[in-house]
Image (tube, rainbow, N blue to C red):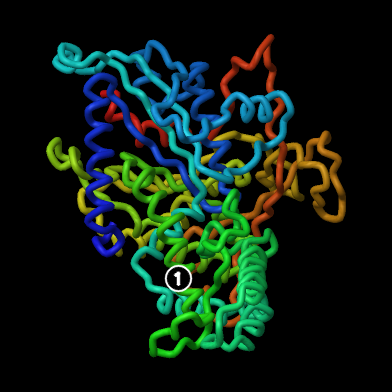
Amino acid sequence: MPPALTSITDDAKIALDNLADRASNLVNPSMRLGVTGLSRAGKTVFISSLVHNLLNGGRLPLFEAMRSGRVSQARLEQQPDDAIPRFQYEDHIDALVRERIWPDSTRAISELRVTLEYQSASGWNRMFSRGRLSIDIVDYPGEWLLDLPLLAQDYETFSRNTVDLARTGIRAELSKDWLSFASGIDIDAPADEGTARRLAESFAAYLKACKSDERSLSTLPPGRFLMPGDLEGSPALTFAPLADLPDTPAPKGSFRAMMERRYDAYKTIVVKPFFREHFARLDRQIVLIDALQAINRGPEAVQDLERALTDVLACFRPGHNSFFSSLVGRRIDKVLVAATKADHLHHESHDRLERLTGRLVDRAIERIGMAGAGIDVMAIASVRATREASVKDGSHQLPVIVGTPMAGETINGEVFDGTRQTAIFPGDLPADPEALFRQLGQPGSELPDVNVVRFRPPALDEKGGITLSVPHIRLDRAMQFLLGDRLA
């Protein structure tokens, strides 16, 4: 994190937290894994499937420690942070397996500890290591991560950036009511609470319209406007950007001064505690994205996803941790960007989805620099909801995927009831992602036709209880990248 985002006091508190974590690690070695992603990317499903496969000996051939039999036990334990809500793993896996419904999406931060008992692959390490690793999984909304760049922006910069973006493309229509209302406010007149509330509501309505399934835009700070929780109605969430602000200081007691003060309060009350207490303590991070949804919604959604990923990855402190540097600071030494819902494509397109995702993060990787950090890109499905088949189309065999569409899904005019399976041709992604990105800025450009259908979780044989492993695509490869070296 650039120094401008933290104060000396913040750094001192972060150092104390890290010292406490490292002291605890001497007794019980642990690793903090951050799991985040933008809306509908499948954070809850990823954590539930990862934990379920660990606890129940799932099929994980690329996760070396499990494949070789070196992991003797995996169990849930009490999390170390009593003030953070527990990730309700049992409820989520019950919804997936027994009810065959997708669990509720992430609305706040939560945590879960999984402890692995293992035998090191190195005889030398077995002499000095107790062969135990606790993985503290920290689940948080990606929208909160998009707030971190606000720490380096004053109110004028925040307003200018937000308004400039709101005046472009499809956002221009969605922001019309908010910007029209804002333009009629005398910003140097005495502050008025009713006007502030109506302006904040109009701005929040614009953000929600951008996030809707019809638009699927991703760059939407401040994140708490979309999920206010117990801060709803508070002054810290009752502000909005203003257009065309003058360079002069805001008059004392004016509407503009009130907006500035509340923006600063949002950073102090909401953003800084999240950074200091949670984000700055992470060791590794996975960022989940729904690239298929963005492609299905058009060029602006793809460009907005690229912009959001650049902002998200720029928040990380990449690099290796030495023993001494990790006592007072902590760097995220591995970051995985995973495009989810690979099961919505035939396997022939999985490598294309992976290459496209890599292209989405190229700019971000250049911006933050590798700095010793391991960054990887994968196409995964935390829970595989489909199977592959082929159908005859004339003289050709057409690759299709087969699954149970969710109730209410419509395919070629047919509405499904949530119980009947169907086969669909999912469409193709381009072999060369550069060709796709070259088209994005051109008038009338079109993206590949990808059929994005919402499928129910698969029907599984419980065999007397939820002890089976949830099917997936490349979850084991993701686990090897994020955890493998810590179990070597």
State the image quarter where residue 444 is shown: bottom right
| Position of 358 relative to 165 (above/below) | above
Q: The C terminus lies in which quarter of the figure? A: top left
Is residue 483 visible to us here? yes
Residue shown at 83% from the left, 47% from the top: 408
Task: Indicate whether 402 appears above or below 62.
Answer: below
| Residue 474 in picture, x, y percent from top left | 48, 35
Residue neighbourhood size for the residue with mark 1, other residues' Cα within 10 Å, grouped as few (<14), some (14–19), many (≥20): some
- Image side of residue 422 versus residue 273, left or right: right
Amino acid type, residue under disc 1 in the picture: Arg
The residue at 44%/21% (across/down) is: 78
User: Horizontal and vertical percent for residue 486?
Assistant: 28, 28
* Residue under the image location 71 percent in, 46 percent down: 454
In-image side of 193 versus 317 (left or right): right
195 vs 374: above or below? below
Residue on which disc 1 sits: 261
Q: Residue at x 32, y 15 (%)?
A: 118
Q: Please name whichever residue, 109 or 82, is drawn nearer the observer in this view of the structure.
A: 82
| Residue 218 in view | no
Residue in front for this viewpoint, 74 or 356 = 74
* Image quadrant assignment for residue 125: top left
In the image, 464 versus 78, the foreground residue is 78
Relative to residue 240, is residue 433 drawn left or right?
left
- The N terminus appears in which quarter of the rendering? bottom left
Percent x, y of residue 278:
38, 43
Residue nearest the observer in this picture, 31 or 214? 31
